[in-house]
Amino acid sequence: MDNIHVTVVGGSRLKNYLHFRRDPIDFLIQVRDLADAVKLYDTEKRPPFVINSPELIREILVSKDSYFRKGRSSRILGMTLDNGLLTSEGAVHEEQRRMMMPGFHKQQIAGYAEHVVEYSRRLVDTFSDGANRSMTDDMMNLTLGIINKTMFNTDTADATHELAKAVEVCIEFSANRLLSPVSIPHFLPTRWNRKHKEAVQLLDQAIYRIIQKARDEYIPEQNHLLAMLIEAIDGETGRPLSDQAIRNQVLTIMIAGHETTANALSWAWYLLAKHPEVEQKFWQELDDVLGDRDPEFDDFQKLTYTQQIVQESLRLYPAAWVILREANQDVEMCGYHFPIHSSMIICPFAIHRNPAYFSDPDSFIPERFAGEEIKNIPRFAFFPFGGGSRSCIGSHFAMMEAVLILATIGKRYQLQLLPDQPPVEPEPLVSLRIRNGLTMRVSRRT
């Protein structure tokens, strides 16, 4: 694309803002087809744009990513995470990512698979035929247990529910501030400020205990992320990382590494229950590949249809439903000049459902990602894990984890929607949740 089409959204600024606050996804879908970049109001001072063009998204996230920072979103998330991988900028982010990348190499991920299956089997063992389960809670607790075991070599089974609730408070707090034009000072004793500080304090207590235990039981060259952080050297000081620096990365991975995967799995179970023809193909693949045994890491590549189910679930309901960037200098992209301090809103949810790139875009069709079909999808028309230097560091782990969890549970149980199931709607917080959660009936497969 040589030049892009840019327009200013119509209507009153107040009306558009209220629409966005009431239903941000609906608003961003409505402006998706107006232009490649849609200016939300006509100003040259900190102009806000909604970005709808895959080519322009590639420029922002990859080709010219050095022209952008996360900005306000990093500052708000930093109130929980401090200066961790998700919130750091520039050279600090590059150093942190380099330091943590070995924990996500293929050989490491292969070793994590047995824990994924073990914890999934533990969950299945608590199921009883015909019982109703909160799948949103089950998936949150499951993925939190898995991330703590695989990344930090600790079993938090006794405290998983408490930790998950604290994470939920932090996420809701961050989402409310991200979508609000007014930032209430954090030192004021409002209800949400108090809840957030209490949640962070609970998480800190748990994490510092985990770090101390890891130091006490340290063995050189252990194969988990926390051991790698303990061994790491700070590039600026030349000294080992402080407990505070390790805490920032542990909390970042603990929250980002379980909440997004849990939401993706909840959406996948919902979609499978709504589409029995897909569910039958899913079961057939499990029976053909696994027979009577549980999955292993080597089965991941063989479970191709299950992978497609995860990909199509992420297309329809991407956990990272919005990506925010701010220009730190003037930048020209695709023939258009964007001034310094321009803010960019990229909505994978809206772009993943663009009929220009996907036929029947609102339908659940896992076969879109089969064989040659996937080659017809433009690179940044489907990007559930972001892209460029800030792409999800754990994307390969998350895919493996989601596929093996679906396989472990799906080979034993069918998950059904309740007869009086109210409409299932997305709730766009920091990641894309199911509003009010999802309760399903578990029925043993025969």
Image (cartoon, helix red, strand yellow):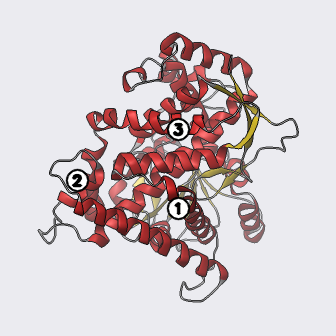
Q: Which residue is mark 3?
A: 122
Does residue 109 appear left or right of residue 156 in this picture? left
Seen at 69% across and 32% down, the residue is 271
How far separated are the C-alphas under marks 3 and 1?
Answer: 19 Å
Question: For mark 2, does the 10 Å Cα neighbourhood hold few (<14), some (14 to 19), or many (20 or more) residues?
Answer: many
Seen at 53% across and 28% down, the residue is 408
Q: Residue 83's quadrant in the figure?
A: bottom left
* Amino acid type, label 1: Leu
Q: Nearer the viewer, residue 402 or 183?
A: 402
How far separated are the C-alphas under marks 1 and 2?
Answer: 23 Å
Q: Which residue is mark 1?
A: 163
| Element on which disc 1 rests | helix
How far separated are the C-alphas under marks 3 and 2?
Answer: 28 Å
Give the percent coordinates (x, y) of residue 331.
Answer: 39, 59
Give the percent coordinates (x, y) of residue 239.
Answer: 13, 69
Label 3 or label 1, whichever lies nearer to me, is 3
Residue 228 badge: 2
Seen at 65% across and 36% down, the residue is 127
Q: Looking at the picture, does residue 19 appear above or below residue 291? A: below
